[in-house]
Amino acid sequence: MSLKQKIEGLNGDEAVAYALKQCNVDLVAAYPITPQTIIVEKFSEYVSNGEVDTEFVTVESEHSAMSACIGGAAVGGRIFTATASAGLALMHEMNYIAASHRLPIVMAVVNRALSGPINIHADHSDSMGERDSSWIQLFSENPQEVYDNMIQAFRIGEHPSVQLPCMVLLDGFVVSHTLQDVAVLPDEVVKEFVGRRRIPNINVMGKVVPYKLDVNNPLTMGPLALYDYYFEHKRQQEEAMKHAKDVIVKVNDEFARVTGRKVGDGLIHSHRMGDAEMALICLGSTAGTTRTVVDALRKKDVHAGLIKVRAFRPFPAREIIDAVKGVKAIGVLDRSGAYGAVGGPLFNEVRSTLYDCDERPFVVDYIYGLGGRDMHPTLIKEVYDDLERIVKTGQVKQTLKFVGVR
């Protein structure tokens, strides 16, 4: 049975800061960038007011922010940062280092289009550039999911079988600046749920020591690893990602027992998929609008469904295969470009996932919402109409389409 929770009016950025305040973080190192700035502004108030004893480091760039986070995590701290768009791109080199060092840093990424032309609104081009960096990626539909994902992210990344950094993603302005009711847990409940960071032991020349930088137990992180060792390091990261799937599911279930809230199985959330003939698959805030369209279509006896992908990394391939059984046509909504590719990032993952299925549905990619352009219900209805034509005719004329572009 879930416990009583307080309702706070929070936007997505404030939900990040509020959850962070409750998670007993040792260090925050961050640089402001729209539309993320509210996160670090709000958290800096908690630091100034003495509500947390976190060390807050203001740095000269996002590259420096992640460098400071790596140092803090390497000595055993629980570490957080936040960024968006060009800031995430500037971190690119250090993001790979954080993951390869197996440091469970948590980072809120407020999705924003990458330049150019310069744009401050939401699309997923920034985080898709990091999809192969070995960071876990959890997408959030609304401020409530932002709050919940933040708390769970520390448990997931710090799990002994995972030990990987984790991104919590929220669409810029659409979620980051939208005020909604958010059910928040008491501080002591979050503190107990998250616990302290557990540091695994490793064997260093026959001596078992904690995996952290310690003058009393010297070890090296990030040494030169040429072709004799580099491959093995990367292979271990792949295994950690596999473990992360099970951990995400278990933490999602455990969180549900405390709060009464869960996002599907933790990896995906299916809506009216039991008898769906056609379905859309998407990430982030667009799921809420799409769910409304699905419910309206169902009243007209149109067998539409929706799959919201919460965990883009690790990718929930088996879960999607199970969810789309019986579906005849799938539309994938990609909020990032596919310049020179067969389709967008989510489309390529889904289509590859379904390739070996005995009964494969038609799969079409719909690029939408670049630079924050609205994906309103009328456009989503048009996508379902297109899928309905595909189901009736059994033909796909284009596998890559653009929605809402002039």
Image (cartoon, rainbow, N blue to C red):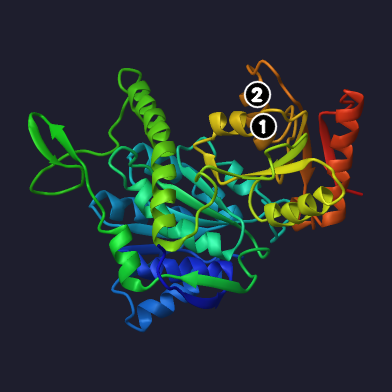
Q: Report which residue position mark 1 lands on.
A: 324
Please tell me which residue lies in front, 218 or 54. 54
Q: Which residue is at 52% across, 66% downward?
A: 32
Q: Which residue is at 39% across, 78% downward?
A: 46
Q: Residues within 10 Å of mark 2 (few under 14, many from 20)?
A: some
Asked if residue 152 shows in the view, the reply is: yes
Residue 329 spot, x, y in % from top left: 78, 31
Residue 345 spot, x, y in % from top left: 65, 35
Quarter placement of the N terminus: bottom left
Residue 337 spot, x, y in % from top left: 73, 40
Relative horizontal placement of residue 203, taking residue 222 as reference (left or right): left
Q: Earlier in the sequence, mark 2 or mark 1?
A: 1
Relative horizontal placement of residue 157, taking residue 108 as reference (left or right): left
Report the residue that reaches farthest toward the bottom: 49
The mark closer to the camera, 2 or 1, is 1
Real-space Cα distance between discs 2 and 1?
9 Å
Q: Amino acid at mark 1?
A: Val
Q: Are marks 2 and 1 in contact (CB under 8 Å)?
A: yes
In terms of secondary structure, where does tag 2 sit? helix
Residue 395 spot, x, y in % from top left: 89, 23
Relative horizontal placement of residue 312, taking residue 163 as reference (left or right): right
Picture layout, residue 267 above or below residue 256 = above
Q: Residues within 10 Å of mark 1 (few under 14, many from 20)?
A: many
Q: Which residue is at 63% across, 63% downward?
A: 175
- Identify the image quadrant of residue 119: bottom right
Relative horizontal placement of residue 123, taking residue 69 as reference (left or right): right
Picture layout, residue 172 above or below residue 303 = below
In the drawing, what numbered circle is on residue 354? 2
Q: Amino acid at mark 2?
A: Leu
